[in-house]
Image (cartoon, coloured by chain):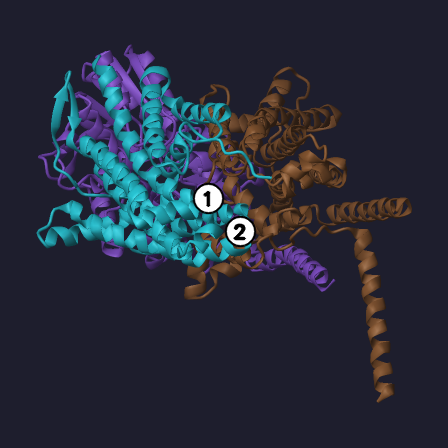
Chain colours: A brown, B cyan, C purple
Amino acid sequence: MKKRTGKGYIINTAVIAVIIVAFAFIKSAFGGNEQFRLIIVPSLWQCCYLIILAASLNLILGFLGQLSLGHCGFMAIGAYAAALISLAFQRAGVFTEKAGPAFVLVLIGCILAAGILAALVGLLVGIPALRLKGDYLAIITLGFGMIIVNIINNIPFAGQEGLSLGSASASLYKNGLGFGTASKVTYLWVALIVTLICLTMMFMFIRSKYGRAIKAIRDDEIAASASGINTSYYKIFTFTFSAFFAGIAGALYACANATLSTSSFAFTNGGILNSTFIVVMVVLGGMGSLTGSVVSAIVMFFVNYQIKNGLWVKSLPGFLGGIFAYPMLVYAIILIAVIMFRPRGIFGTYEFSLLNFVRDIKEHRAKKALQKAGNKEAKSND
Amino acid sequence: MSTFIQTLIVGLRLGSIYALVALGYTMVYGIIRLINFAHGDFIMVGGYTMIFTIPLALAMGLPAWTSVVFAILCCALVGMTTELVAYRPIRKKGTSMTALITAIAVSMLLENLAQAIPAIGPNPVVASQIFSTGGFSIAGVTMEWTTVSTIVISAVVMVVLYQFTQKTKLGRAMRCVSEDKEASILMGINVNRTIVLTFAIGSGLSAVAALMYMAQYPKVYTTMGMMLGLKAFVAAVLGGIGIIPGAMLGGLIIGLVESFTTSYVSSSMADTFVFLILIIVLIIKPAGILGKNVGEKV
Amino acid sequence: MKKKLACLLLAACMCLSLAACGGSGSAASATPAASDAAETPAAGGEITIGTISPNTGSLAAYGSAVTTAVDLAVEEINAAGGINGSQVKIVNADDQFDPTECLNAFNSLVSQGIGLIIGSVTSGCTSAITDAANEEQVCLLTPSATADSITTVDDYVFRACYADSFQGAIAAAYAKQSGYTEVGVVYCAADTYSKGLYDSFNTACEKYGVTVKAVESTASLDVQDYTNQFASMVKAGVEFVYAPYYYDVIGPYIVTQARAAGYKGIIMGADGYDSTPDYVVDGADLSVFNDVYWTNHYDPADTSDKVQSFVKAYEAKFGATPNAISALAYDAVYMYKQAIEKAASTDATAVRDALADTSAVYTGVTGTFSLDASGTPTKGASIISFTSEGTTVTTKLVDVVKELPQA
């Protein structure tokens, strides 16, 4: 077993290294390309924060088995915290332009601070989670999400008057961590590495003692506490841990958009970034599968992007084109169908792992070979 | 003093609408332990049905409010269809979590389906006057008849519902199913039929709520059920979900809190206080004000 | 095992489809790349203008107002021989009233080689793309984003409407002119538009020596009851209340409830009040709408030829009276036409220079105006009132304010 883990680390590190080298190559080769700059890089940024957000919600929804309907509230805290802190640093003269080691340090600091602040609020939300569960907890988290948005709206230096209005958003772009098209390309590595680290941490979390404990709580809370698991501690810990990543996703959102408006973090809105739709993403991907959340976030983003901006969609004839004019309708139908036929989501609890992937392919080949041999034998027996 | 009375009246009329909506939530929750997120959207369905049938009623020489009959039928139909097509198959194999997510999906579906229907579309519409205006005045503040009738109707509906669940055969079957499904099958209760009928009644109630809502606040739009449904749901939870008088109590509390916060504390922070009250009550009394804490069976 | 493989296969398909995203995008760019060649358009060429509007989502009504008016203007221009002999083509993108989607839509248009864009409709969305427009050197002309900070000197962003600071100040000046020294405000704390107008009204009140005595707000645009807010106004004794909201709140809720709460004074609003008469309660006593005033970009009942020909053409084509946003979008297309003709080029920088020329005079439906150094029109606002005898609400032009009075 030990040996296998070591092997896993080696394979994963190697693959990641190869991907990074390949990516650096792509960047140098296509850096000046319009499509790369304007479409692929902004899309990657958006995928990054959606992935982190969906995966972090999955910790609560899929692994702890509690429904949280206010996850975007944590994201809002992260986004506003990162934006305001970066503006404060600029005013203090720590950095003057979006380059150099000072800025990178501030950027990383902001991302971390966003996560920590969100985690503190997550701790606060986790406390009612001790006494409540299921539907009641869902409504509490919903309430927290609403309160967070309502309070941010009323804070004079944030909310509507501070960061979403043009002047301040321009200042976030000029003086803060809001990225334009060019800096999005320059700092793409930050988004990718942050996402990678977050995902790794979450994977490690669910495979650790903590992960096994919360899965036990999900499956049977009474049995779990009877076998000595401190359920209160693990529940609060999961909420805090999950909120931390939602905060980081918020910081990336602030970087990628350079405009903040609380309507983006609401319970629902017309788009795909809101507390309800993140739940939809997690459920579609699979409750209890981080792989599922990652894939689902990417696919939902891609589908939504194509429906909004894909040229092929505009050329669709009558009826089909009519359906695509209401993408949310399509998503709702898909969601109902998935729940009916695969109640635990498309990926269920499957986790992708390179090591297993290699092993599975080998096994599959061996099986096939065996089958072939079996067939031959059967034939020769005839 | 007049400010106080004014605030009280506003609170009562908001609260009684929340209470009417909350009754529907509570009915359904009581029997299948499902937060029917789509309930708010049933109100939207009722609202649009009335928008389309009010001219019809007027043409037949009937008062505008009679169109609520069509709305009740339409809502009950939508409610039963939702139960048969979406909730029942999922209840059979999924957990309570998947059922809840289905409810969210149905809510999304109804809202966006309404937007996609050309006759409805994304623009709001304004209903015509349903009840005659006017009222009586207390301490210089006018209490409109519409407000009075909303309060009276929600109280009557509550009493009737309560009596219905206590005294009639179907009502007793409902309580029986909510207590123990397997045992009620053994008692010869047709569980599925009881659930469908509960949905029909709960959704029909949402049409009545839609009527009172439109009489007071005459704007109808596809996402109207969202905030209204959420607040009403909060009311139901606050009072103790599944308990009929609890819905009434919770609705009035939420309405009054909202109104008094607006008048006396901060008008832009009303939402914060509504949800804060909910959180505090639930932390102190996890089953709601009138709810009983039931220990878990091991 | 099979299940796992199926899942993997699915994942692989999804990754491939992501890769195809880039692929389909670059295939798309191949066609409009021709626009580089068309920078100095020869007769018979094609000029592509991009539009960004909220076609879906909660402000879909504004999206259709823009797209219909732009279609009308383009049809007229093409029928009259196009711009410099080239036909105009419109590529529309949806922003869902969401800043992120707006930026995506913008990037998608730019990657198709489009250098002239009309959009977006709301201040919130537009401010998400102004920086990108400057960075990409793409000309952005917004029909209706009124937030002050949208346009700055030396940039690629222009607009067809006046700014919030002007609109709020006009209301303040009107209060002063009508003899009110104490006023109240009811606004929505969660809406950029409402909040922005409140701020500018507040500043202008200080300037004109008008006291803002009572301020009340609402937590969201979903609020239905405004009785308490107006009861506070009555309590404060003000007789002029500035309430910057949209038509769908004014018509069914605010005016009726304010009167029921005993408020009898003036209610003043801004361009969001446009199309309120379509959103009033039939059969209710509509005389409550008397004494409601608002500022607008144009008056559809204006008898000038320009306005009437636009209103008639729009009504003939779409069967509805155009609102102010339609009028502004229509003007925006003609502003581009004039600028392209002046620059004799469709190159974004050349058109930008033509638009930045403050001496150019545009004659549009919303008035005759030129742009100031920042790119905002210097034009008057119409002050309009509602009048009602109880059964219907009609609008009446009260005054046209060309420029702000001195303090």
* Secondary structure of the residue carrying numbered label 2: helix
**Marks 2 and 1, how far apart at CA:** 34 Å
Nearer to us in this view, A253 or B239: B239
Residue C169 in the image: above or below residue A262: above
Q: Residue furthest bottom?
A: A382
Residue C115 in the figure: left or right of residue B273? right
Protein chain holding label 2: A
Nearer to us in this view, C70 or A367: A367
Disc 1 residue type (three-letter): Arg
Q: Which residue is mark 2?
A: A304
Neighbour tally class for label 2: few under 14, some 14-19, many 20 plus, Cα within 10 Å:
some
Residue C162: x, y in percent? 35, 31
The circle drawn on residue C383 is none
Q: Residue at x 30, y 51 (%)?
A: B75
The quadrant where residue B271 appears: top left
Protein chain holding label 1: B
Residue C94 in the figure: left or right of residue A338? left
Q: Which residue is mark 1?
A: B33
Disc 2 residue type (three-letter): Asn
Residue C3: x, y in percent? 69, 62
Q: Residue at x 32, y 32 (%)?
A: B248
Q: Residue furthest front?
A: B187
Residue A45: x, y in percent? 63, 41
Residue A122: x, y in percent? 60, 28
Quadrant of the frame with the C terminus of chain A? bottom right
Residue A220 in the image: above or below residue A307: above
The quadrant where residue C368 appears: top left
Nearer to us in this view, C384 or B183: B183
- Looking at the image, can residue B92 be seen? yes
